[in-house]
Image (spheres, rainbow, N blue to C red):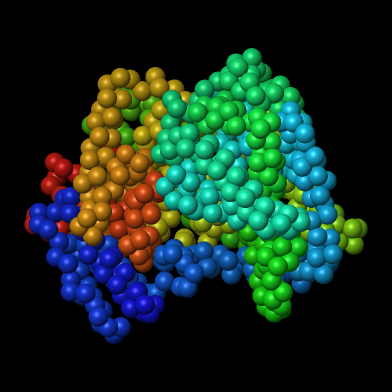
Amino acid sequence: MGKRILSLMLVLSALVATCTACASQEPVMPEPIINNTEKPERPALADNYYGYANYDFLSTSQIPNGRPSYRSSDKVEDAVKEQVFDIIDRCVADKSSSDTYTVMVRELYSMYDDYDNREKEGITPLLPIIGLINGCKTTEELVEALGVLYQEYGVSSVFRFIVAPDTINTSKHMLLMMLMNTCGSMKENFTRTDAGSEQIGQTAEQLLKFTGVGEVEAKDRARAVVKMVNEVMVNTLDSEYENDMSKHYTRYNRKELSELLPNCYTDKLLSAFGFSADEIVVYDTGHVSKINELFTDDNLQVLKDYAVTCIANEYRNVLPPSYMNNGSNKELTPEERDENAKSFVGGYFTDEVGVLYGREICTEKVMAAATKMLDDIKASMRELIQNSSRLSEEGKTKHLKKLDNMIVLLGYDKNYQSPLTLIPQKNGGTLLTNYISFNSGKSKKAISTLKKDADRTHWNMTPIEVNAVYNPSYNSVCIPAVMLSKNVFDPDASEYTNLGYLGYVVAHEINHAFDSQGYLHDENGNYNTDWMSESDKNAYIEIQSRVIDYYHNYHLLDMYSINGKVTLGENIADLGAVQCISNISDKKEDLVLLYESIASQWAELMPVTELMIHLESDVHSPPEARVNAVLSSTDRFYEAYDVKEGSKMYVAPEDRIRVW
């Protein structure tokens, strides 16, 4: 099917998606488009605000080749990529600069582009650890080898530890035993789709063949790796419970951990990984219990193959070109080589490049305007909390204290210290050896932080990540530099246009402090189910139940439901965010700009097949629902537009979900 025809069919999907849960009548499906010149009729504002506000984008855009969908925010990512590439170009051209991060970028680019030297070196720097793992005769020996793999190469496999604030006492760090290394795939990619299994299987087979294993044997051993990982993932909690501390917070002392994992030599395991901890939190008991069951000498070969697979996955983009191209002899053009080198440096050394990016984006003017917006949003939140009918006076005091104690990090970490100790090419450094040093540095940094107090000003995002996040353990919001770029936030633009984009994002993250999981953490980030009184909790649980039902009864294309439980936290944050920023002005012209901006940031062409995947695995509601469902429950939306009963966007006042 031609791309243009496909695009127009997708427009139909977007424009006919309506708020049927709240509608007074069933939506009318337009006639299908059968040629590539017609455009669907623009929907009425009161029936489908998402389609109305985004009509031009939805009816004229096309999904670029290679992408599963296309969002208006993809333009932001494309612009960021262009800016990052420009920074790298300037670093490469600046041969005289001694700035730490400029030198790093320049050297790493040069090393990546040195294909001859990379091919000559091959995987030699990784052979010692691969040989150590393959030489293990018992699982007890393998435990020691996996410790070396983590400390010296920065790679985890069946055992994966992280250091994070203790959920009960967030001023201290805790050692957590997490899910095994799944090469970036979530549980559902194994149990509901084949994506995770395919990736791991292909990686295992490719590296085994690259190291001299015959094709038939490599396939058989790769299948065994996939089978083992799938067995573990079947015994893993679904991703919808990832923030549920009642399921993911079980403390064990060393004796108890040994009893839970009798096959895993736990004292030796912790020592090999470099962790001196008397207590460990196990993130998913069923998951690690299954690992223990499989961690036997009978499964030694598959355990070793999986560890080597994890090495290949971590280092796949720095291995020799012949490995990366899977044996292909294709000659790359200079332009392709330049693109590959910049993509690698910008994609893997994001904090290092991000410091340079942040210095350029976070001007005094931008920071002053963003800080004022933040102050306005916090003031609006204070007003909503103070006037909330569901909170007791004590509850209001506690909520305000949590809001006042919240840390908002804007821009980038000016005190960032790279874990890479760079060895320049002239001194014998190579891309692979420096990347090993980089990963080892990250592991050793984690080991060293275990005994240190937690720092609530810690940045857990890179400056060039197009996203924002709320951390419940720190009670902090992180807004990286890219969200302050002109593609998202323009201090010269209308205040309400900015509020509808960046303001929505900031308010959304702040509202996560009070969502279905955030409300279980106190003002210091401690997990504390007694933080709120029983009456306030019960009133909030009633709101949550209404949110679940509201979204469950919201249908896309008149047939696809949203899982209200899976998306609960994000839906609460969306509803609270729009209620918050709508509260900043009651002028119609301001509200119109605000809602147009909100709608525009969620515009997306999404095939029905992609929508189904989204509904199955994403904790966020689909884009159209993040506009129509939210605005239909926002009182000031009705003040801005003449939406009357009988319109599909209309929800009766008593049925609207007011988080505050």
Q: Position of residue 164 (x, y in %)?
A: 60, 32
Q: State the residue lying farthest toward the front.
A: 216
Along the horizontal axis of the image, is 505 left or right of 420?
left
Quarter of the image where the N terminus is located: bottom left
Residue 622 visible in the snapshot:
yes
Identify which residue is drawn at 47% across, 60% down: 489
Q: State the residue lying farthest toward the right.
A: 427
Q: Position of residue 269 (x, y in %)?
A: 71, 27
203 up-or-down from 525: above or below: below
Along the horizontal axis of the image, is 51 left or right of 515?
left
Along the horizontal axis of the image, is 290 left or right of 72?
right
108 up-or-down from 282: above or below: below
Identify which residue is drawn at 36% across, 64% down: 606
Quarter of the image for residue 91 reads bottom right
Q: Where is residue 100 in the image (x, y as percent from the top left)?
A: 78, 55
Q: State the residue lying farthest toward the top.
A: 255
Along the horizontal axis of the image, is 594 left or right of 474?
left
Quarter of the image for residue 552 reads top left
User: Foreground: 416 or 199?
Assistant: 199
Identify which residue is drawn at 35% across, 61% down: 609
The number of callouts visible is 0
399 up-or-down from 464: above or below: above
User: Foreground: 523 or 73?
Assistant: 73
User: Foreground: 203 or 599?
Assistant: 203
Residue 486 visible in the snapshot:
no
Quarter of the image where the C terminus is located: top left
Q: Position of residue 183 (x, y in %)?
A: 59, 48
Identify which residue is drawn at 63% across, 28% down: 175
